[in-house]
Image: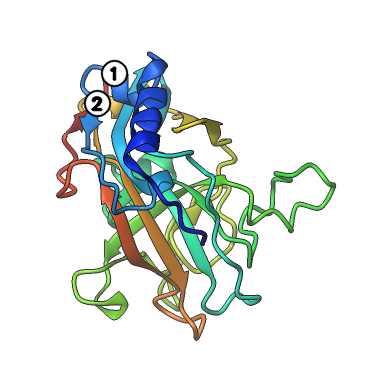
Amino acid sequence: MRSILIVPTSLLLMVGAATADENHAVNQDGAVISPADTAKVAAFDILAAHAHRDGRRVTFHMTTNGTAGSDTPTPVGDLAGAPVLSYVWPTSLDPSSVGFEGETGILALAATSHPDFDDTPLFDEDGDGDPANDGTKWHSHWVVLTPTPACGEGALGVRDIEEGTTPRMPATWPGLPIFIDSPGFTPLFDGPEITLNVAFSDESILADAAYDGVTAALQVNANIHAPLLCVTDVFDIASGDLSLPGKLN
């Protein structure tokens, strides 16, 4: 992953660009605001996370201190040990709200990039006629996160599907042995902003929902075995403590 050097003058320009569009998360009432931190990679330094809804459709977006989506992982050439970069919106919604087995962890929406594998078999993100070569392209997932000691002390991981079990999965589950869905919602980028527009089958479940914003790195286990996918580095948390202070209105 390439580094981005930020000097005070360019930082001011970045912040100015981020706040210039009134539709950006940083300018929304009720957004979860996070202070700029020049020690962080700008593309993953969160300035604000926000979500709002129109009936059963929800817009999740995040303002960063750099150009959102400009950094992608350096490939390692194999699934084992493959790196993943992500923009994540953890929510208070039960996993059953998007088709997973209920009460199984933290339901989170994520936009990810991972050049070493493609986990969206139903979609051809780059439009070249091959749906199996698009891992680098930013794409969306629902994931269920759980505390996973095998990933490290206090670390989260994407919940594994235990051998011999058949928990409920969404219709667009990509077949990996983890609680992950590939719904095909397209991440949109606008300078410092990343946006995901998603739809739910039942708008009643969205009442009083809460959210947060996180940028993080994940990694596939070198043995491609449980735990399959661990959170290895948290770059920024909008709330600072993953308290889900954002309210979906």
Amino acid, disc 2: Ala
The image quadrant where one finds the C terminus is top left
Amino acid, disc 1: Gln
Point out residue 136 in the picture as x, y percentages from the top left corner.
63, 55
Point out residue 100 in the picture as x, y percentages from the top left corner.
41, 51
**Dot 1 crowding, Cα within 10 Å, few <14, some 14–19, many 20+:** some
| Closer-to-camera residue (87/47) | 47
Seen at 63% across and 62% down, the residue is 115
Rounded to the nearest whole Å, what is the CA distance between mark 2 and mark 1?
A: 6 Å
Seen at 26% across and 25% down, the residue is 248
Report the residue marked by disc 2.
31
Point out residue 87 in the picture as x, y percentages from the top left corner.
41, 46
Does residue 176 lie above or below 226 as drawn?
A: above
Report the residue marked by disc 1.
28
Point out residue 154 in the picture as x, y percentages from the top left corner.
19, 70
Q: Label 1 near label 2: C-beta < 8 Å?
A: yes
Seen at 58% across and 46% down, the residue is 138
